[in-house]
Image: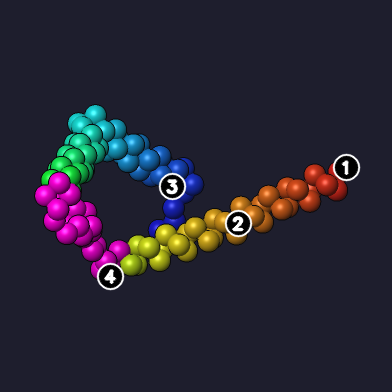
Amino acid sequence: MKIKGSDLFRFISISFILVFLAIYFAQSAGYFDYNTNKRFNLTNKAISKFEKDVKSGKKIDSSKYLPKDKNYDNKVSKIGMSVSNFIDRSFNKVLGYLFKEINDAISENN
């Protein structure tokens, strides 16, 4: 099956619109504010606990006050990171080449 340029453009456009709408509704529903507020409350609780421990003369260990980081490493995330790094390197090479050619073309005209 041959894909026409207009079909590909339509697919990419619709994909961008759907991603935009998902981010927009997540923001308007307060998802990001909720997560920020939750982190802020955890930080305030940790500060209060730290201050209490300092006043009472307890031994201070930073691991008691900082939240534990979850480890999300798995095969899928590693593959995703590899693909992302590949795309990043590819774009950097293509854009570097493109701008070099544009610079050379401008330099030749002067």
Q: Residues within 10 Å of mark 1 (few under 14, many from 20)?
A: few
Q: Residues within 10 Å of mark 4 (few under 14, many from 20)?
A: few
Q: First in sequence, mark 3 or 2: give its number.
A: 3
Say if the magenta span includes residue 68.
Answer: yes
Alpha carbon separation for disc pair 1 and 4: 53 Å
Residue range in magenta is 53-77
Asked whether the residues under the numbered discs 3 and 4 touch, taking CB atoms below 8 Å apart as contact, a structural biologist would say no
Compared with 34, 73 (above or below) is below
Q: Nearer the viewer, mark 1 or mark 3?
A: 1
Q: Quadrant of the C terminus?
A: top right
Residue bearing the label numbered 3: 8
- The secondary element bearing badge 1 is classed as loop
- The secondary element bearing badge 4 is classed as helix
Rendered location of residue 46, percent (x, y):
17, 47
Compared with 72, 57 (above or below) is above
Residue drawn at (75%, 48%) of the image: 103
Q: Amino acid at mark 1?
A: Asn
Residue bearing the label numbered 2: 94
Q: Residues within 10 Å of mark 2 (few under 14, many from 20)?
A: few
Residue bearing the label numbered 4: 75
Foreground pick, 108 / 50: 50
Asked whether the residues under the numbered discs 2 and 4 touch, taking CB atoms below 8 Å apart as contact, a structural biologist would say no
Asked whether the residues under the numbered discs 1 and 2 touch, taking CB atoms below 8 Å apart as contact, a structural biologist would say no
Name the residue at the bottom extreme.
75
Alpha carbon separation for disc pair 3 and 2: 21 Å
Name the residue at the right extreme.
110
- The secondary element bearing badge 3 is classed as helix
